[in-house]
Image (spheres, grey):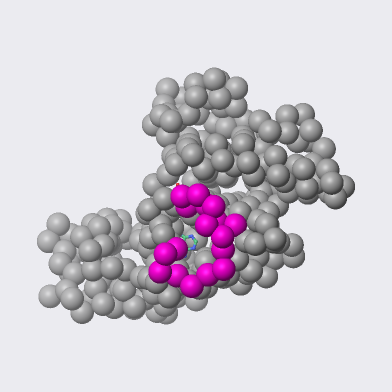
Amino acid sequence: MESNPTDLSALVISDKEFKMISELVLDKVGIHLADNKRTLLVGRFRKYLLENKLTFTEFHQKILADKTGNMQNDLTNMITTNHTFFNREATHFAFFLKTVLPEIDLDMKQNKKSDIRIWCAASSTGEEAIMIKLKMMEHFGVRYNSLNAGMLATDISTKVLNQARSGIYLQDNFKDLDPKIIDKHFKKVSPEKYKVNDNIIADIHYTIFNLVTGHYNFKQKFQVIFCRNVMIYFDSPTKEKVINSLYNVLEPGGYLFIGHAESLSRIKHSYLDIQPAVYRKPQ
Ligand SMILES: C[S@@+](CC[C@H](N)C(=O)[O-])C[C@H]1O[C@@H](n2cnc3c(N)ncnc32)[C@H](O)[C@@H]1O
């Protein structure tokens, strides 16, 4: 039955239509849509079709004909789950501060280097990248300004990247952050919203990157990669491909942080297992 754009509460996505969307998503976005995501997807589709006054068939025809990439963006924004918050999986940031940054610092001093290259992959709205930056500032203090220490923060969704660039966050996202940090680094801009100070996001370079289809040809390797809570959306072969692509762009001795719910146990890889959800490339 063709869906009627004026009565979307009755929108039913047939098995055939769900298969068509799943194939599109796998082909264009690289995400494997499991059957258990169907209810979620249908809900988001309903909203999108209603807002754009489209039937399912019209949507499908339009996306296949679209050469601008806008429809693919819409599809990506529709299917991705961007939930994140400050200090999520806090043990990682503690380990980064206590162990990883002192090691990087020592290596810089011993080898007279001044650059730090960190990649926050699947950064969503930027809370994770800001946490990394705050920990770097905490470790280096005023020395931070004399370092060549930019950060790459990427995501597949243009919507979350734009939000990250704005630096504006809802009060709810701060629940796990020390109020002293909020006072020091954020300004209240409305009763529920805060804006992060410019000096925090000035050297975070937010850009689009699809971990599945992207080309990992970076000029220099990274000392640390955070790639957390995104591989849960990938099937095993995709996860293995991404994990090994990240390995190739890590420096020897570099660290990889993944989400605590994401295991590498069934994946072929060469990382050393350091602690829960922390891996290291051998020296
Ligand atoms: C649940 S959020 C995780 C955010 C953050 N890393 C954290 O741990 O809180 C997952 C993010 O992965 C992004 N994502 C999904 N598939 C992706 C892909 N193939 N390449 C890059 N990012 C992707 C989504 O847009 C979303 O912002």
Between residues 195 and 64, which one lies in front from this camera angle? Answer: 195
Give me the residue at 30% from left, 73% from top: 21
Q: Which residue, as the protein is rendered here, is positioned at the far right?
A: 112
Give me the residue at 82% from left, 38% from top: 146
Q: Magenta span covers which residues?
A: 264-280
Classify residue 170 by image quadrant. Answer: top left
Locate residue 170 relative to residue 14 in the image: left or right: right
Locate residue 215 relative to residue 60 in the image: left or right: right
Across and down, in percent, residue 123 comes to 52, 51
Please say whether residue 42 is visible from this viewpoint. no
Across and down, in percent, residue 143 comes to 79, 33
Q: How many marks?
A: 0
Ligand 1 location (quadrant): bottom left
Between residues 273 and 257, which one lies in front from this camera angle? Answer: 273
Give me the residue at 65% from left, 62% from top: 282
Relative to 91, residue 7 above or below: below
Between residues 196 and 234, which one lies in front from this camera angle? Answer: 234
Please say whether residue 239 is visible from this viewpoint. yes
Quick one: quadrant of the C terminus?
Answer: bottom right
Give me the residue at 52% from left, 57% from top: 273
Classify residue 139 by image quadrant. Answer: top right
Quick one: quadrant of the N terminus?
Answer: bottom left
Locate residue 261 relative to residue 215 in the image: left or right: left
230 within the magenta span: no
Across and down, in percent, residue 204 comes to 65, 46
Between residues 6 and 234, which one lies in front from this camera angle? Answer: 234
Relative to 27, residue 210 above or below: above
Across and down, in percent, residue 162 comes to 53, 49
